[in-house]
Amino acid sequence: MKKLILGLGILFLLCGCTNVKDLTIADTVQTLKAYDHKANIYRTGYKYYLPRGMSVADSTLFNEILTNSKETYYLYIDAVSYNKKIKKSYEVCSSCYYSVALSYDDKFGYIEINNQENNKYLIEIMYNYAKIEVIVDKDKINDALLTSISILKSVTYNDEIVANLFGNDVLNFTEEEFNIFNTTSSDSTYLQTDGYYEEEDEEVLPDTDLLN
């Protein structure tokens, strides 16, 4: 019965029949099994889906800064681990606001949410050798999870191009090392040093593919 109710909740969410704020975080995470967007952003060795209402603020070889003008999402692609097919298990964090290991469709990852200063919440979600970090207000957690899940699930790699990049030692000169298997508490780049995150008052039209 619980699975039936959850399945109906996901169905209603996708067809726009319910509000994401009415779902628990655990229910929102289950949308990982439902979303299947086609890529609309193409990069060297990979592609992904960028929801409507979002734009690319900055891009390097395997790092993207995405924004909807209210929040900033930091996307990291770990082509090194993908090329070597490295797998690591995630240990659930009992002291975190929310923590869960992900395993679906032969892909793995984790979600970890931690409370920050000024009642902000840091969301870290890793799946399919890609990771997103974003800081949001508490009432925006579900929205941010839906956005992040839709992006990460859509990431598709070009094996031939990725292999050629490593063969040409491109990464040795153009990318700083970032370990997506570690959480920000032990391995952070953008969120600690970039200073890009800021809030604006401008209202942005949400992606109707994701939200109601």
Image: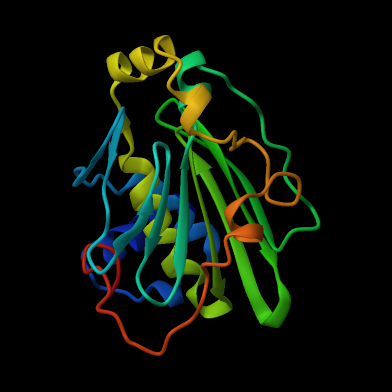
Q: Does residue 26 appear left or right of residue 160 in this picture? A: right
Occupied quadrant, residue 10:
bottom left
Task: Look at 34% across and 13% down and name the residue there.
Answer: 164
Give the x, y percent position of residue 106. Answer: 44, 25
Occupied quadrant, residue 63:
top left
Task: Look at 31% across and 32% down and name the residue there.
Answer: 46
How is the structure coloured here? Answer: rainbow
> Which residue occupies the foreground of this view, 195 or 3?
195
- State which quarter of the image contains the C terminus: bottom left
- Compared to residue 167, the image places residue 52 above or below, namely below
- Residue reaching furthest right? 95
How many numbered callouts? 0
- Compared to residue 121, the image places residue 174 above or below, namely above
- Residue reaching furthest bottom? 201
Task: Look at 27% across and 54% down and name the residue there.
Answer: 50
Occupied quadrant, residue 1:
bottom left
- Compared to residue 101, the image places residue 15 above or below, namely below
Q: Does residue 5 appear left or right of residue 16 in this picture? A: right
- Compared to residue 212, the image places residue 93 above or below, namely above
Give the x, y percent position of residue 23. Answer: 46, 69
> Which residue occupies the foreground of this view, 98 or 114?
114
Task: Look at 48% across and 81% down and name the residue there.
Answer: 199
- Residue reaching furthest top? 167
Give the x, y percent position of residue 150. Answer: 34, 51
Give the x, y percent position of residue 136. Answer: 54, 72
Q: Does residue 74 appear left or right of residue 176 in this picture? A: left
